[in-house]
Amino acid sequence: MCIRDRIIESFLENDDADAKLRREEWQKKFVAKGGFEFLLSIFLNQDKDKGVCFAFSKEMDKFEKECLGFIGKILNVFIRSAVYALDGKLLQEVKNIQGKLVEEPEVKVEEVKSKETESEKDTAKKTQVDLKELFKAKPSKIVFLKTSDSLQSTVREIGNMEMDREVAKHIIEEAKPNEIWTRQIDLLSSIIYSGNVNFFDNIIVTAALELFTSCVLISNKIFALAKEYNSHNVNFEQILIKGLNCEQSQIIREKFAYIMGFLCYIMKDSDTLEYTLNILLSNIPNKSSAEAKNCGEYFALMGKLIDIHYESASKTIAIDPKKYLPEFVEMLKKHRSLEKHNAPAEDKLLVGLLEIVRKILLHEPDMKESVSISGGLLHEVFFNCLFPKHCSTAGDVPLTAEGEIADTQKCKSSKSRSAAYRLLSAMCSDNLRGQLHFVKDCLEPLCASIRPHSGWA
């Protein structure tokens, strides 16, 4: 049986007494025979003298990339379950995270494999090696492995895994987190800056981000070191922004958002949350940039981090709403929508701005009155986003260069209109003056502009 199936079985067998004993015995054998160290040496590209070399390059074929991603996932399974075995409090906190973060993406390997050519499948079969000998002696040559979607389920079930404490201690001692994290950041940089991201690059990025997270769980000093990363004039902040806005892969965008949300939640009482939020707040995509078309995950992460900030028991991390909220409102006012009537695609930058303003107002209710009335936000959302002013007043109708009535409505898609209505609701909730202003200056003029149809026959 190949090592993939044995590793999965070793963690996911039924929880009866015999299965637990078999699982623990297999884990002990795997570690005792040097299996973990061997996979780690492959992944860190350390056994060049033995012909074991797995350095990422643009010339790697799909199978080599899949193998590299698979080994990274297996290493993460062992390291993460070892960390949880030694820290029950952390494990419980991880279980409590469910539903508080952006959804974790799923990489469906089998969908791509079904499209492989026969020659590619033959090559893959020839390179697979039976690992029964792994338990007889320490392996000395590279072993290529095929992955499957079942591995994704394995990673998803990681919080339920059990590992013998002695095995866990050995894995943590041999894990080399200082070497692993630099390898992962190098991988991320190489792929997302390559300009040609494909499906199998997604597998490597997913594994690299998970392994980086495991290193941080071993020692939170790793994140501090990562912030100082700089290679080939690319730093960690640039990698983070590039990953969140990756034009060629939604999976990469979602994974970056999930991992950074996870780390900020686990380390919410450190400066990790403040550091990440400041990066996001300082790098809002603009309409003319390519990132504006793919910024949904960017704003989803920002919204989650704002929630985590306000829910955190520590108040040493500061978001200055008096600084950022007016800036977001001004950006919303100046934004020219990319949406078109009868087209389902939403303007993600517009939706993101509406949602972030709403998030901040929900956590800063004392600012609702000033922002909605004096700041003109009610007027902006009601008339410019939802009901163009020329529909409700008889004067100054905006015209195009061709003399036609201009389409000034910003929110035309269902998502952006829903976001605008949610913001209206947030502004008026527990805001009496805002409610009165809404009725008098928004609803009444709109109702007065409605003319009943008189041409019924």
Image (cartoon, helix red, strand yellow):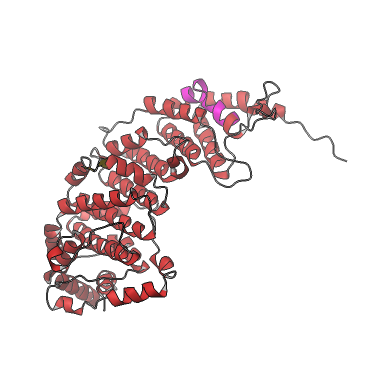
The quadrant in which residue 180 appears is bottom left
* Quadrant, the N terminus: bottom left
- Tally of numbered tags: 0
Judging depth in this view, the residue of 184 and 431 nearest the camera is: 184
| Location of residue 154 with respect to 354 vertically, above or below | below
In the rendering, at what x and y percent does residue 436 appear?
Answer: 57, 24
The residue at 38%/65% (across/down) is 109
Give, as a single range, the part of the protein colored magenta: 369-383
The quadrant in which residue 104 appears is bottom left
The residue at 22%/71% (across/down) is 143
Residue 40 visible in this rendered orientation of the protein:
yes
In the rendering, at what x and y percent does residue 211 appear?
Answer: 24, 55
The residue at 51%/31% (across/down) is 335
- State left or right for residue 363 relative to residue 260: right
In the rendering, at what x and y percent does residue 18 appear?
Answer: 22, 77
Is 318 contained in the magenta span? no
Judging depth in this view, the residue of 62 and 77 nearest the camera is: 62
